[in-house]
Image (tube, helix red, strand yellow):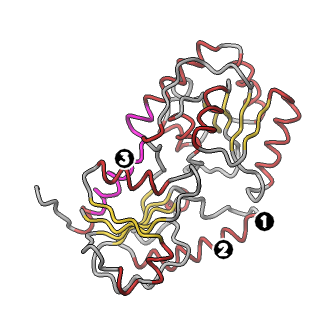
Amino acid sequence: MRILYAAKHNKGDNDNEGAIAHALAMLGHQVFPVHEDTLRDQWPSLRHAHSPDLLLFQNWRNPPALDDVNYPKAFWYMDRIDYRGDDILAHWTAHRRQWMSYVVPRVNVGFCTDGDWVAQDRTGRLKHLMQGADERHLAQPTAPGTKHKVLFCGSVYGRGEGRESFVRELQATYGKDFRWEQKCFGQRLRDAVQSAQIVVAPDGPIGPLYTSNRAVITCSLGGFLLHPRCHIMESMYRDGHEAVFYSSRQDLHDKINHYAARPDERFAIQLAGYHRTIRQHLYRHKLDTILSEVKARCGITDPLD
């Protein structure tokens, strides 16, 4: 397929767009990435550039008028959409609902990492699909981590009171044994994840069918992942074998202390989680799912079929 891909500039090492373009190329497709602002501003001249078979975009801030495109259109929205009563995040919910109300009727299919939002969809155009790992930056673990007992990588500001209370509790409980990294990507993230004993995922914002892609990234970099119990993670990784899930804050602390004292058990889980990720949860696997769905819905046939 020839894919016109509305992408963003690479934000340092947080390069989802580069990972997606790389995965599409590995699957044998021709990809034409155009910055989303450029594509919007020059839409009349660029919408048919390269004679595309598909327009693919993500969280396009201000998409153009899509009604005048006569070839298939698909998006992949990679954030939580509805924060369900969290007043701190109400403005995000309002903006994202508005985006969906405009875009969904104008595409053939949309994929959302927020499966809780997809579950209430009545258009038939939305599919649930979690993000994947960037196979350009995989890192198989070689030994259990020996440095900080507990590591959290991620932001807190603007993510709701639940996440703020999570970090405060870890700081109060573990003191110098707790490490908090913000804006951590690339080599720095890999070093942090592999050197820590336990990498924790916060218990908010999260839902039965939504979690941050940091979970998959942690496993792809060889970290030991301790994650809130939820349906989507239980469908992706085996509890106690490829990752470990906690059911409450007390359960979180109990499991931190349990696994911190058992490095060999930790390492076996790290290794199994890494191998599950490279078998099933790379961006290449996710893009293959997207393109198969697009072909089925739009009647696209590969030249060699």
Q: Secondary structure at mark 3?
A: helix
First in sequence, mark 1 or 3: give its number: 1
| Of the two numbered discs 2 and 3 in the rendering, the one whose residue sits closer to the viewer | 3
Determine the residue positioned at 75% across, 24% down.
Answer: 254
Dot 1 amino acid type: Asp
Seen in the picture, residue 272 relative to 21 is either above or below; the reply is above
Magenta segment: 276-294
First in sequence, mark 2 or 3: give its number: 2
Seen in the picture, residue 259 relative to 207 is either above or below; the reply is above
The percent position of residue 49, horizontal first and vertical second, equals 30, 77
Please tell me whether the stretch drawn in magenta is mainly helix, strand or loop.
helix
Q: What numbered label is drawn on residue 87?
A: 1
Q: Secondary structure at mark 1?
A: helix
Q: Is residue 109 visible?
A: no
Q: Per the image, is 274 magenta?
A: no
Dot 3 amino acid type: Arg
In the image, taking residue 2 as reference, residue 266 lies left or right, namely: right
**Label 2, on which residue?**
94
Determine the residue positioned at 36% across, 45% down.
Answer: 285
Q: CA distance from mark 1 to mark 2?
A: 11 Å
**Label 3, on which residue?**
284
Q: CA distance from mark 1 to mark 3?
A: 36 Å
In depth, the one of 292 and 189 nearer the eye is: 189
In the rendered image, which quarter is residue 45 located in?
A: bottom left
